[in-house]
Structures are given as structure tokens and as C-alpha cells.
Amino acid sequence: MDSPRPHERPTAFDRMLTPVHRWIWSDTNRRVQKLLRFGETETDGGRDILRAAEVTSDPLLRRLYLEHAIDEFRHGILFRHRAAELLRVSRSHSNIGFQGDWLAPGGHGLDDLQVDGESDQTMLAFLHLSEKAAASRFCIYRDVMQHDPPTRAIFEEILHDETFHMNYTLTQLARVEPQQHKRHLWRARLSRLWKAYLRLATSLAAILGSILLTIQYFVLLPPFAWMAKRAAHRESAGWTAVSPTSSDSLNRQY
Ligand SMILES: [Fe+2]
Ligand SMILES: [Fe+2]
């Protein structure tokens, strides 16, 4: 069994992106938008875990899921309140522009979760990996937030809860599935990887689509515009008399 760790360390990938995270969080308006979005993600995640508490038949899991859901709702409130405070003190109205959502996503990725129809094992494996990812990212976000101590304190507090969520889900997975819990973790890992690939592919397709449309606009459209302009010059101005013989049919317009 993977031994539960009291503190999660950021992954090498998250650590590598630290300068990007520092830049993303440096702008107050961007910070407000991200905190609002994080608040939404946490609340949505809490709602899904509440549903998991309803559908599980395991009394211990139900109790833990309820506590977990309460934590996630509280995280949502913490993020939203901090965003509101920042919004109140922020005087500048700079253009928010690039948000870097795919580089600095909200914690869990719980939006991928389909609670109904999941077994306790798959649910716990999914939750463990999601909480682990959240703990890793929040660790980085806390570290790059030296310029904003109140927001840093919120990340510190939430990180403590996410580490607990990460650990209890692994412990419970090993309890309900002592023999094959690693297999469930690997399946959940592959599923997350596949969904990450799909997200990346969708983003790339959107970027490529925009580039192709822009190229079409500047390369294909001008010749047609030029031809239309030339044809318009050839048209005589005003009304054009139609010969009586060509318009004698009542079944067609011309
Ligand atoms: Fe959370
Ligand atoms: Fe969590």
C-alpha cells in the first residue's frame, strides 16, 4: 500500500511552472478572476462529494464524504470572500486578458467526476488523485503568493485540508479494496491522463482553427473581394430596363 504522507510536495511539472504561476498570480485583476473561478470549482466539487455521500452504502465513507463536502464548500466561500476583498481594494481596471487556466487550473479537476454509477473504489481512487493534484498546485500557489499574505494564508489553510483529503481517500481505498487498490489507482491515473489529453487536443484544435480561419480571411478573401468590386464597377447605375419579351412568364421572377 502507498503510505499516506502527512504533507504533499508539488510535482516536478508544477515546480517547473513556478515562474509562470508567479506571473499569472502577480496581477490583481487576474488574481480576482482566478479566485472566483477556484471558488466555483470548490463548491461544485463539494456538491459532487455530497452526492457521493448520498449514494455510498458504506457508513464510514458517508461520514467522511460529508466532512469532505463541508470542507470544499468552505474553500469555495474562502476563495470568493478573498476575491471580493481584492475587488474592493483594487482600483485599477486593467484588461484581464490571458488567464492561463490550463497552466494554473483550479484545484481538483473534480469537474470530470460522474458520481452516479461509480463504485466506492473508483470514486476513492479518483478523489485521491484529484486531491493530490490540488495539494500539489496549492503548494505552488501558496509559495508564489509572498506579495499577498492574506491570499497566501488562504492557500495555506486549504492546502492543509487537501492534504487530509488526499490521505483519507487513499487509506479508505486500501480499506475497501485491500487487494486491488493499486489497480484502481492506475486506472484512475490513465483516465485522468486521457481526459487531460482530450482537453489539450481540444485547446490545440481551437488554436489551429483560429489560425486557419485567419489565414483564410487574409489569403482567400481578398481575391473574391477584388472580383466583386470589379463586377460592381461593370454594373450600370440606376434602374435597368427589361425587355418585355424576357419577363412575360408569371411563374418566375425574371
Ligand atoms: Fe478544496
Ligand atoms: Fe479537497
Image (cartoon, rainbow, N blue to C red):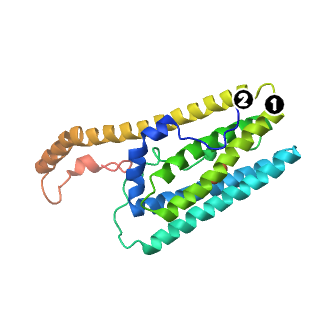
Q: Amino acid at mark 2?
A: His
Q: Nearer the viewer, residue 34 or 18?
A: 18
> What residue is at 73 percent from the left and 41 percent from the top?
169
**Under 8 Å from ligand 2: the CB of mark 2?**
no
92 vs 189, left or right, is left
Which element is circle 1 on?
loop
Residue with the mark numbered 2: 184
Give how far across and how far down residue 103 sits, in percent.
Answer: 45, 44
99 vs 111, left or right, is left
Identify the mark nearer the N-term, 2 or 1.
1
* Quadrant assignment, res 191: top right
Q: Nearer the viewer, residue 241 or 92?
A: 92
Which element is circle 2 on?
helix
Residue with the mark numbered 1: 177
Per the rendering, the mark at residue 143 is: none
Q: Residue furthest front?
A: 6
Local crowd size for mark 2, using a 10 Å CA cut-off: few (<14), some (14–19), many (≥20):
some
> What residue is at 62 percent from the left and 44 percent from the top?
7
Spatial separation of the CA atoms under disc 2 and disc 1:
9 Å
Give how far across and how far down residue 39 sits, in percent.
Answer: 58, 59
Give how far across and how far down residue 35 sits, in percent.
Answer: 51, 59
Question: Badges 2 and 1: C-beta atoms under 8 Å apart?
Answer: yes
